[in-house]
Amino acid sequence: MKRILFIISVLVIITSCCFPVFAKETIGVGAHIGMHNNTGNPDTYDPSIQIDPQNSILLGFSFKTNYTFLFTRFGADITFLINKGRVRENSSEIASTDIQYLSLPLFIGCNFRILDTGNLYMGPGVSYFSARGRINSTVPTLSEDISATGWGFGFITGIEYSLLLKINIYFEWEYLNGRSGSSIQSQSAHEWDDMYIDFTGHRLMLGVRYYLI
C-alpha cells in the first residue's frame, strides 16, 4: 500500500512541475456520494446465471489539481451494501453475494474551462482495489468469507460548476475494468479456487469540491 501511494504521489508531483496552472481553482478537495450497480458482477464469471444484482452506495473524497489544459485527480472510495446480489438460477451453486471494497483511483486527462462557471474534464486512469465480503452457496460447505485485491483501468468524465466562492458542485461518471485473482471455490465439482471478484462497472458520483488555491 505504501508503494502504491508513493507512486501516485510521484506522478502528481511530476505532472505539477511540467505544466503551468490556472490563475484560480488550482487545487481542490472534494467529497461525494455515488452508486455502483451490480457490484461483484457474478454474471460475468458465469453468463448463464440470472441475478438480482447487488447495489452499493459509494462514499469518497477526491483531490483534484487543474492545469492549463490538463488535470490530475486522485481519490478514495468505499462502498456500503444497499442490497445483496441474489442468484435466481443456481447453475453455478452460487446463492448470493455481499461484497464491499475500497478503491484508490488516479486519473490524468484534459481539462476544459466553461467560461467562468466551471470546467469539463475527462481522461484515463488506473485504480487499486481491496475487497471483502461473503459468497453464499447452495452447498453450505462452500459458503465462505472472502478477501481479495486487484488492479483496474478505466476512464472518467466530470463536470463542475461554481456554486460559491471557491466552492464547486461536481458530477462524475467513472468506468473501471478490473478483477482480482481466483479467490473462492464456486462449485463442489471443482477442487480449486476458480471464482474471482469482478470490480468492473459504471459509477455515478455527485459531490462538492472546495478549492484551497
Image (cartoon, grey):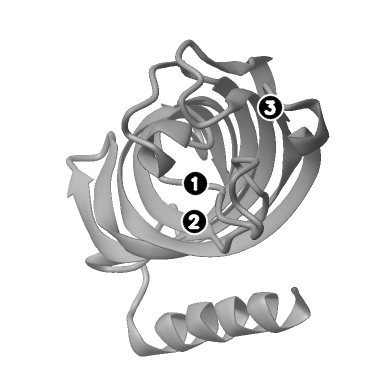
Disc 1 and disc 3: Cα gap in Å? 20 Å
Q: Secondary structure at mark 3?
A: strand
Q: Nearer the viewer, residue 75 or 163?
A: 75
Q: Looking at the picture, which amino acid does disc 3 mark?
A: Ser
Towards the viewer: 142 or 39: 142
Q: Residue at coordinates 66% horizontally, 56% vertically from top-left?
A: 183
Which sits earlier in the primary sequence, circle 3 or circle 2? Answer: 3
Q: Is residue 7 above or below residue 166?
A: below
Cβ–Cβ below 8 Å for labels 1 and 3? no
Q: Is residue 121 left or right of residue 179?
A: left
| Nearer the camera: disc 1 or disc 3 | 3
**Quadrant, the N terminus:** bottom right
User: Marks 3 and 2, Cα distance to the nearest angstrom?
Assistant: 21 Å
Label 2: which residue?
179
Q: Earlier in the sequence, mark 1 or mark 2?
A: 2
* Residue pointed to by mark 3: 137
Q: Is residue 30 above or below residue 65?
A: above
Identify the residue position indicated by label 1 in the image. Answer: 199
Q: Are marks 1 and 2 in contact (CB under 8 Å)?
A: yes
**Residue found at x 49% / y 47%:** 198
Horizontal and vertical percent for residue 138?
A: 67, 21
In what quadrant of the picture does the C terminus appear? bottom right
**Sequence-first tag of 1 and 3:** 3
